[in-house]
Amino acid sequence: AAAGSEQEACSSGQPEDSHLFQSILSGILAPYWESTPTAEAVVSSLEQQYPDACLGFDHFAFRTFGVEGLGIASAAQLFTDFGYTRRDAFEFPAKKLRAYWYAPPDPELPRVFISELKVEELSSQAQAVIRKYAGGTDAALLGKYGVMSSLLGVQPWCTPSWEDFQTLAAESEYAAWVLVNGYALNHTTIAVHRLAGHAGGLEALNSLLQEQGFLFNTEGGLTKVSPDGLLLQSSTVADRVSFCFAGGETRLVPGAYIEFAERRVLPQFEHLKPEEVTEQHRRDGFETASADRIFESTTLAAEKVQ
Ligand code: OOG
Ligand code: NI
């Protein structure tokens, strides 16, 4: 919670009309800090090591079921209402996912990455499970107000059964994740290039946090680098959270994780002095191959449960 309030303090100087939006972002972060002790510990550690730094969030990520009434648009509405614009589309055929990222109206605000499961590509058995929770007559309401559940730290549909969770997990780890986590923040990302007082970029930060015992997703290598070499990303493995299923069994399921991103200065702005560089002079957007591996941050947690 400390991190959440600090973050709000960092955003002073924003126009008044963004106050509500800032509060909503803090509200989305509150259950995330609560249920993701690794993210809390990482942020506390960074605040201690870089007391002069104001931690900036590079992006927020959400997951959804791609069914009528829900899907990417349902999670994006809040953001587009507050001035975000939809940017590039991404496809992850093997994972049966598609995604978009959304650019903020103000470069100080986090980008947003939203993905959805192509539900129609799953088996009829898995589709039936998803429709049981997210495909009822109230699907339009779930889509419209589902984001509110991310403020509350609950899934928007009725409590799933352990059996249904397992049915989905057998086919799509992502589907099982959404079933128990709903619209909860999947991860936030620390903008390493904005971490005042830190030298050595993402690689140095990874080493530092690994020395402190934080577990990273090493799928496809610890640091995911875009082909242009300008976007570097890494992430922890998701925390496991205790979830009480409908039948009463309590099990550990994968929850959220924290990511780190370093956006390097674009070649055309290399001549700028460090103090002249702003977010607009840096590599923007996301990278399909890197994202594909970052998705695995929750799979790794799930494996440990077995
Ligand atoms: C999103 C994975 C992709 C990125 O920054 O490329 C991603 C997810 O795990 O839902 O966050
Ligand atoms: Ni991300």
Image (cartoon, rainbow, N blue to C red):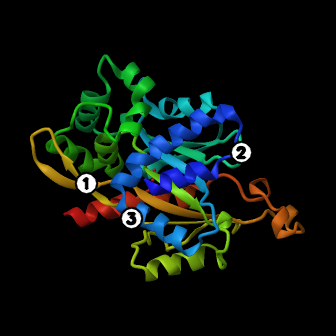
Q: Which of these two is toward me, 87 or 39?
A: 39
The local crowd at label 1, few if under 14, some if 14 to 19, many if 20 or more residues have their Cα within 10 Å, is many
- Is residue 51 visible from the viewing direction of this image? yes
Label 3 and label 2: CA atoms lie apart by 30 Å
- The amino acid sitting under disc 1 is Val
* Secondary structure beneath label 2: loop
Is the C-beta separation of discs 3 and 1 under 8 Å? no
Mark 3 or 2, which is nearer the eye?
2
* Secondary structure beneath label 3: helix
Residue 226, compared with residue 4, is above or below; it is: below
At horizontal 42% and vertical 61% (from top left) the residue drawn is: 40
- The amino acid sitting under disc 2 is Gly
Is the C-beta separation of discs 3 and 2 under 8 Å? no
Q: Which of these two is toward me, 163 or 282?
A: 282
Q: Which residue is mark 2?
A: 13
Q: Is mark 2 within 8 Å of ligand 2?
A: no
Residue 122, compared with residue 136, is above or below; it is: below
Q: Which residue is mark 1?
A: 253
Residue 80 image-quadrant placement: top right
Residue 104, compared with residue 296, is above or below; it is: above
At horizontal 39% and vertical 20% (from top left) the residue drawn is: 141
Tell me the tag on residue 38. 3
Mark 3 or 1, which is nearer the eye?
3
- The amino acid sitting under disc 3 is Thr
At horizontal 44% and vertical 69% (from top left) the residue drawn is: 219
